[in-house]
Amino acid sequence: MSTAGTLQQLIQAAEAKLVDAGIDTARLDAEILLAHVLGCPRMALYGKLADPVSAEAATAFDSLIDRRQAFEPVAYLTEEQEFWSLPFKVSPDTLIPRPDTETLVETVLNQMSGRPVRSVLDLGTGTGCICLSLLHELPGAQGYAVDISAGALAVAKHNAETLGLQERTAFLEGSWFEPLGGDQRFDVIVSNPPYIPSADMADLMPDVRLYEPSGALDGGNDGLGPYRLIAEQAPAFLAPGGILAVEVGIHQADDVKALFDAAGLVETGKVKDLGGIERVVWGKKKLIFQPFSLGMPDKTR
């Protein structure tokens, strides 16, 4: 078997290439991609840095490094990204799940703690990471994942099957609430909608600007267009006491909260992510209390 050097040599050469390309995470990226090619955990590389690498593996690794030099995201190269400690397949049809979005999952679980959750609606589901993570934590719930992209829905379906959640998840192709029946009500509605103002799209990092789907990023002139639609239509689809929770961009939380307040949602709030940025806005539909009789005797008789 011909070899192309040791693991250490390949990692060092790849790191140098990525540094020259201006990639800040050069060493980490090189290790992740080599581990992917070799089919082993990244940390396992450290125990065999002096081992030889086959010419075939080295060629595959070099191909991935060339693509990373052009700023293609690592997650697209490995076709996987962890979210909520669960594995999710990703593709160029979907946004790459990010740790900040876990704040949205955590917020819903905290706010609905102690209340039965029977249904979860995820608008713009992408990989399905939000909906499927919630279903993983809420065993009594049924999920409804909506996306306008058939390619994204195919990825979400794959992830549901991988996680054993396919029987509890319905996948609906269409824009926002359009695929739903008018009589459907949900205990939880979540979304990580496009929220980048159109004028800011050109300033995004090249990893994002060149590769991630623009339709999942561009939120219109002020970045608030999707939130206006969601705030206007979501209350009709919320069950009494149900929660609407969305991810927001930097400096958008106050504006989105005002939209939720104006829509008649109650107990509205904002939640910061681990970086201290207001990342999630939520509100609930008011509970309806029915009058009831205590069965007291009629003293007028």
Image (cartoon, rainbow, N blue to C red):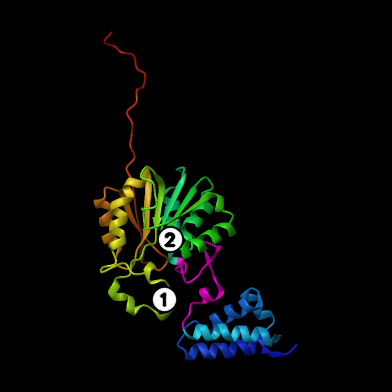
Q: Which residues are magenta?
A: 71-99
Magenta-drawn stretch contains 76: yes
Which of the two labelled residues, at mark 2 and mark 1, occupies the earlier sequence position? 2
Give the amino acid type for the residue marked by disc 2 in the picture. Answer: Thr
Q: Is residue 283 above or below residue 289?
A: below
In the rendered image, the residue lying farthest to the left is 262
The quarter of the picture where residue 259 lies is bottom left
Give the amino acid type for the residue marked by disc 1 in the picture. Answer: Val
Residue 7, x across and y down, in percent: 65, 86
Q: CA distance from mark 2 to mark 1?
A: 21 Å
Quarter placement of the C terminus:
top left
Residue at 26% in and 47% down: 264
Count of numbered badges drawn on the protein: 2
| Residue identified by numbered label 2 | 103
* Nearer mark to the viewer, of 2 and 1: 1
The quarter of the picture where residue 12 lies is bottom right
Q: Is residue 293 above or below residue 269?
A: above
Residue 48, x across and y down, in percent: 69, 82
| Residue identified by numbered label 1 | 208
